[in-house]
Amino acid sequence: MSHDFPLDLVEAQTAWYRTYWQLAKSGPTASTTRDRWRLQQLSKQIAGHPYWCGPSGTPAARMELKELARREVRR
């Protein structure tokens, strides 16, 4: 099933992956406070999005959103 995700939700999930991978690439002496804070904010934005309250907000839709965002980041 293909979902029609709101643009702001896709953008937030894509930003989450970009931030996560940037954090993962950080060296041991890098300050990661800002990136960790950003991940928390994006996680709240994604999890609390009104889209999930509707009939399309299924676990399968969450996985599809993640896959869509991963593909977008890898471009």
Image (cartoon, rainbow, N blue to C red):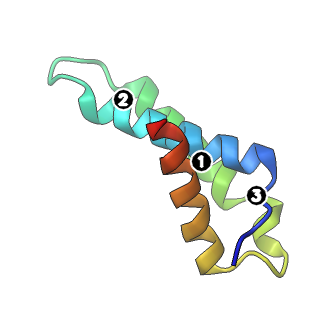
**Residue 22 — which label?**
2
State whether residue 40 appears in this view. Answer: no
Residue 35 in sight in this render: yes
Q: Residues within 10 Å of mark 3 (few under 14, many from 20)?
A: some
Instruction: Give the number of the mark in front: 2 or 3.
Output: 2
Residue 62, quarter of the rendered image: bottom right
State the quadrant of the N terminus.
bottom right
- CA gap between label 1 and label 2 equals 14 Å
Tag 2 or tag 1, which sits nearer the N-term? Answer: 1
Mark 3 secondary-structure assignment: loop
- Which numbered tag is attached to residue 49? 3
Upstream in sequence: badge 2 or badge 3: 2
Q: Secondary structure at mark 1?
A: helix
Between residues 70 and 59, which one lies in front from this camera angle? 70
Q: Residue at x 65, y 72 (%)?
A: 61
Q: Which mark is residue 64?
A: none
Q: Label 2 is placed on what type of residue? A: Gln
**Residue 32 point in image, percent of width and height:** 33, 26
Residue visible at 71% across and 71% down?
A: 2
How far apart marks 2 and 3 lie (CA) works out to 24 Å
Q: Could you say where residue 39 lies in the image, as x and y percent from the top left?
A: 49, 40
Q: Is residue 46 above or below residue 64?
A: above
Label 2 near label 1: C-beta < 8 Å?
no
Pointers 2 and 3 in contact (C-beta within 8 Å)? no
In the image, is residue 64 above or below residue 55?
above
Residue type, numbered disc 3? His
Residue 52 quadrant:
bottom right
Residue displayed at 51% across by 59% down: 67
Q: Is residue 51 left or right of residue 63?
A: right
Please tell me whether mark 2 sits on a helix, a strand or a loop.
helix
Question: Which quarter of the picture shows residue 68?
Answer: bottom right
